Amino acid sequence: MKGLLLRLLLGLTCFTWQLGCESPKDFEVAHVQLTGNDCVSCHRPDYEQAQAPLHQQMQKNLYPLQCGSCHDKDRWSPAHFQHPFPLDGQHALTECRQCHLGSPPRFAGTPNQCLGCHQTEFERSTFPGHAAFQDTCLDCHRTSAWKPATGLHPEEKFAISTGVHQYPCLSCHNASLGLNSAANTDCVGCHDGVHERAVLDPIHQALGLSDYPTGAAPANFCLNCHPAGRR
């Protein structure tokens, strides 16, 4: 007891990895003296082994080492911190400091919308170009992975959700032909067999269609007469 009182008077903190705690009572008193920044001195193994959520990956810290930000000294679990939006998918593997910048990291006022972190990706995207897109990234992207995106299609112009063309975007859009639009669609890239030009050219020419090409033509020339992809 005298030893305990002496340590209290001197203001010493008991760290198990440095001095070792002589009794449960010593631990309880020393625990009260700890600040939220001291926990990791004893609880580094708990931090490194935490799985839900993952705290460390490939020796990179995904969460701050200031355990008191999320944990209480009364008990380790449950943690009381709740992120403003669910950290799922790739966000669960992202280090806090990648979004919370500064030294020390800034938490209050950090952008909570996708473009707060992904503005560069939005502006650099060329296929499709995002200049005319809304900044509601979750309309097309998921937190599990940035790609593939599943965007909204102009159904009124060319139905792919209710029509026969229910295929992945790149099945119809050819990046070498330019940005995503009707201009880079590749009808003849998919339509083979009975739809090959060797078959269709004689049929269309027999109909006397003056605007039907007889030689080289854009890959999407079919849209001139079949704008919605129907006969």
Image (spheres, helix red, strand yellow):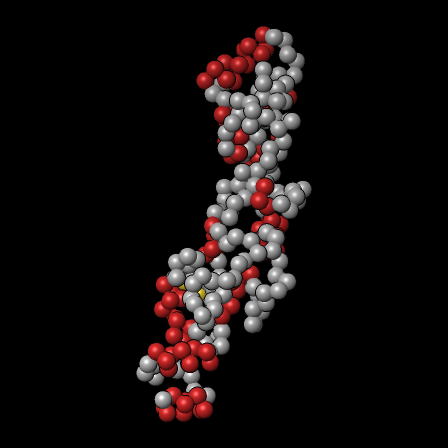
> Is residue 14 in view?
yes
Numbered-mark total = 0
Q: Between residue 131 and residue 59, name the one nearer to us.
A: 59
Residue drawn at x 62%, y 58% as measured from the top left: 111
Determine which quarter of the picture holds residue 22.
Answer: bottom left
Residue drawn at x 39%, y 71% as measured from the top left: 43
Above-or-below relation of 45 to 193:
below
Q: Between residue 58 and residue 191, name the one nearer to us.
A: 58
Q: Position of residue 3 (x, y in %)?
A: 36, 90
Above-or-below relation of 207 to 23:
above
Q: Between residue 145 and residue 186, name the one nearer to us.
A: 145
Q: Position of residue 87 (x, y in %)?
A: 50, 54
Above-or-below relation of 8 to 186:
below
Q: Between residue 105 and residue 18, name the one nearer to us.
A: 18
Quadrant where the image shows the C terminus = top right
Residue lying at the far front of the rendered structure: 1
Quadrant where the image shows the N terminus = bottom left
Residue drawn at x 49%, y 65% as measured from the top left: 70
Q: Position of residue 201 (x, y in %)?
A: 55, 14
Residue drawn at x 41%, y 57% as measured from the top left: 52
> Is residue 216 in view?
no
- In the image, taking residue 124 as reference, residue 90 lies left or right, namely left
Q: Position of residue 27 (x, y in %)?
A: 38, 79
